């Protein structure tokens, strides 16, 4: 009987741990992709490319954070590295949409606040 109780307890703990994983990023990306498709009149192919750009930028930022936690990157280096990732993303978004950097930056600022809610 104790084994069953322990097994049930372990299952409950593991289920609650997996249920608490953040799912906000996917929802933010969906909102961002929807708004970008409306604003820039993107085809399905371009939406997939934009999603790939978003995922790549997120992975690069996560790698920076991991480097900070591991002590490989100092806090002072984070700003420069993050700025480089953002510049590349904005340039790629401009190429993808055919819009200027200024238009892309206006879009990102407007939609960024809207999709984080």
Image: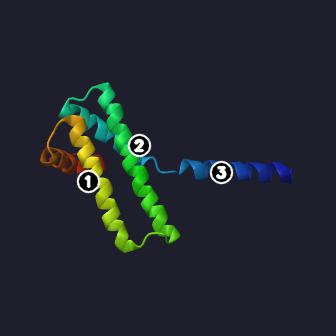
The residue where tag 2 is placed is 26
Q: CA distance from mark 2 to mark 1?
A: 22 Å
In front: label 3 or label 2 = 2
The residue where tag 1 is placed is 87
Mark closest to the chain's N terminus, 1 or 3: 3
Identify the residue at image location x=18%, y=45%.
Answer: 104
Horizontal side of residue 72 vs 79, given as left or right: right
Residue 77 numbered tag = none
The one nearer the camera, 46 or 36, is 46
The residue where tag 3 is placed is 14
Horizontal side of residue 63 vs 86, given as left or right: right
Does residue 117 appear in this view?
Answer: no
Mark closest to the chain's N terminus, 3 or 2: 3
Identify the element where label 3 is drawn: helix
State whether residue 47 is above or below residue 13. Answer: above
Dot 1 crowding, Cα within 10 Å, few <14, some 14–19, many 20+: few
Mark closest to the chain's N terminus, 2 or 1: 2
Dot 3 crowding, Cα within 10 Å, few <14, some 14–19, many 20+: few
Q: Quadrant of residue 100?
A: top left
**How far from the left and from the top, in percent, is residue 96?**
25, 36
Horizontal side of residue 3 vs 9, given as left or right: right
Number of marks drawn: 3
Q: Quadrant of residue 40?
A: top left
């Amino acid at each position: 009987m104790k084994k069953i109780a322990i097994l049930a307890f372990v299952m409950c703990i593991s289920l609650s741990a997996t249920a608490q994983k953040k799912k906000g990023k996917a929802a933010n990306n969906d909102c961002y992709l929807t708004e970008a498709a409306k604003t820039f009149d993107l085809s399905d192919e371009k939406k997939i490319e934009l999603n790939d750009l978003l995922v790549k930028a997120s992975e690069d930022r996560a790698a920076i954070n991991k480097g900070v936690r591991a002590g490989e990157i100092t806090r002072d280096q984070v700003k420069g590295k993050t700025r480089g990732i953002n510049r590349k993303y904005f340039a790629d978004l401009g190429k993808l949409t055919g819009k200027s950097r200024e238009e892309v930056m206006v879009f990102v600022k407007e939609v960024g606040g809207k999709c984080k809610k």
